[in-house]
Image (spheres, rainbow, N blue to C red):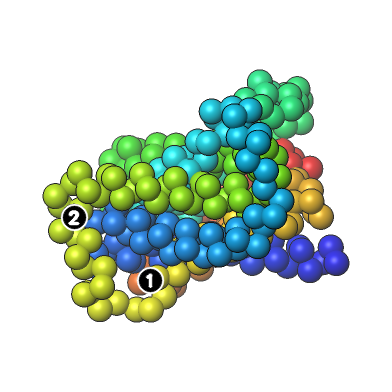
Amino acid sequence: MTALFVILTAIIGLSMPVQTAVNSRQERFLGSSLVSTLVCFTVGTVLVLILAAFSIGSFSAGGLSTIPWHAWTGGVSGMLCVWLFIIVFPRLGGIQTVLLPMLGQIATSMLIDTFGLFGMERTPLSATRLIGALVVVAGVLLAVLKKDEGQGKKGLELLPWQLLGIIAGALIAAQSAANGALGVHLGSPILASAVSFTVSTVLLVAMVAFSPTDRAALGNVFTVKRPWWTWMGGVIGVLIVAGFAASAPVLGVGLMSVVSILGQLAMSVLIDKFGLFGSEKRKVTTLKYIGILTVLAGAVIVHL
């Protein structure tokens, strides 16, 4: 049974860079990163609401008033995270769009654990976890702080987009903590996911409605011809949320995180090297491979 969940988690890890590449490709057809994000979340919301319908029996409305405000913020964090991924992917490529968010995700996760944010149980910051985080930082620096051969730009010109990548990773950690807290209060991680997806979609609809440019791009959703797989971002998102919810109790957060990270790193290399899903081909240098392996080693130290 454990082996099956390891395989499932590896598939989820592989699918995470794919979701970003697919959503980014959708953005190129629609001409709006915001509308591309809306399409992703709309598809995901429909699917997760169908799944939630089978979990509604475990829901009790009586405890809604006791849910802290921060437990409802997962949808905001998730929406911003996916939007930032769509924005930075064409500029940074698959590898950086995986590595930099890991930096933000690990740092924010450690802050959440250390200070008990989002109602999480406090976990003292150990020397081992701190060393692991520093190893991750070293790996990221090896992989990204160098002239990008694919774009031909100097590192300083990419710095704003790299910072956005780190922020996206921080939002992943915040979303996970908020949805986890909401899932505990609602008695179902699927119901929590449904709330998160719905909040994201509502916010995106409002943002698009207030932007004339994005409203115009919205008309391209059903008129512009594009590959069928550009619609799959939301489906992949539901797979990620549901898969993590199923795997965590069996594997534990540590093993699940490491297996997922391994899948993310492997797929990011393939996307850059072969230009998968219509992305730009980028040279994967030896230094990048060393950086990737260093990040993986740091993640193992942090999570195990």
The C terminus - image quarter: top right
- The answer to which of 87 and 212 lies nearer the viewer is 212
Foreground tag (1 vs 2): 2
Q: Is any atom of residue 302 visible in this view?
A: yes
What x and y, as percent, mark residue 79? 42, 46
Q: Is residue 124 left or right of residue 198?
A: right
Residue type, numbered disc 2: Arg
Residue on which disc 1 sits: 230
Marks 1 and 2 sit apart, C-alpha to C-alpha, by 20 Å
Residue on which disc 2 sits: 215
Secondary structure beneath label 2: helix
Mark 1: few/some/many CA within 10 Å (<14, 14-19, 20+): many
The single residue placed furthest to the right in the displayed view is 1
Is 223 located above or below residue 237 in the figure? Answer: below
Mark 2: few/some/many CA within 10 Å (<14, 14-19, 20+): some
Is 266 located above or below residue 257 in the figure? Answer: below
Quarter residue 149 falls in: bottom left
Is 103 located above or below residue 240 in the figure? Answer: above
What x and y, as percent, mark residue 192? 60, 47
Of the two numbered discs 1 and 2 on the same chain, state the one appearing first in sequence.
Answer: 2
The N terminus - image quarter: bottom right
